[in-house]
């Protein structure tokens, strides 16, 4: 599986602590019968902290681009990633 870093964000939490997050798209391969195609997932990693990975969300590059843009725009953290992706699906 390949990992494509899309963006890094530096955010301040409620207590005033600086937190740094890396948002990545995961690119894997899925076999469907005699066909093979790319599948996409997402990863959010906090520097020195939590990491959340959700592979194999979609086979559409346009859909994963929409999702990663949504995650970055709303500063989604590793803790809330699964809930956001579940609602998005």
Image (cartoon, rainbow, N blue to C red):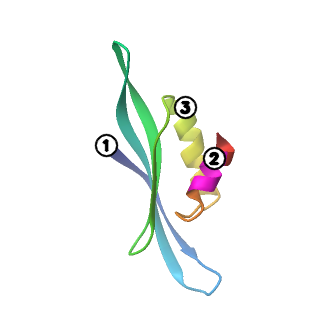
In the visual, does 9 lie left or right of 14? left
71, above or below 11, in the image = above
Residue lying farthest left? 1
Residue lying farthest bottom? 15
On the rendered image, what quadrant is the N terminus found in?
Answer: top left
Residue lying farthest top? 34
On the rendered image, what quadrant is the C terminus found in?
Answer: top right
Residue at which label 3 appears: 62
Frontmost of labels 3 and 1 is 1
Residue at which label 1 appears: 2
Q: Nearer the viewer, residue 56 or 14?
A: 56
Give the percent coordinates (x, y) of residue 24. Answer: 43, 51
Is there a contact, CB below 8 Å, between mark 3 and mark 1? Answer: no
Q: Residue at x 38, y 75 (%)?
A: 48
Cα–Cα span, label 2 and label 3: 18 Å
Give the percent coordinates (x, y) of residue 78. Answer: 52, 63
32, above or below 6, in the image = above
Frontmost of labels 2 and 1 is 2
Cα–Cα span, label 2 and label 1: 23 Å
Residue at which label 2 appears: 86
Q: Residue at x 53, y 38 (%)?
A: 64
Magenta highlight: main SS: helix
Query: Where are the magenta residues, as a range?
Result: 82-86
């Amino acid at each position: 599986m390949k990992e494509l870093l899309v963006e890094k964000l530096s955010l301040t939490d409620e207590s005033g602590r600086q937190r740094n997050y890396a948002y990545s798209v995961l690119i894997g391969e899925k076999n469907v019968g005699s066909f093979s195609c790319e599948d996409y997932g997402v990863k959010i990693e906090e520097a020195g902290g939590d990491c959340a990975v959700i592979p194999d969300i979609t086979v559409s590059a346009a859909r994963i681009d929409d999702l990663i843009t949504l995650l970055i725009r709303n500063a989604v953290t590793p803790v809330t990633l699964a809930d956001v992706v579940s609602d998005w699906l």
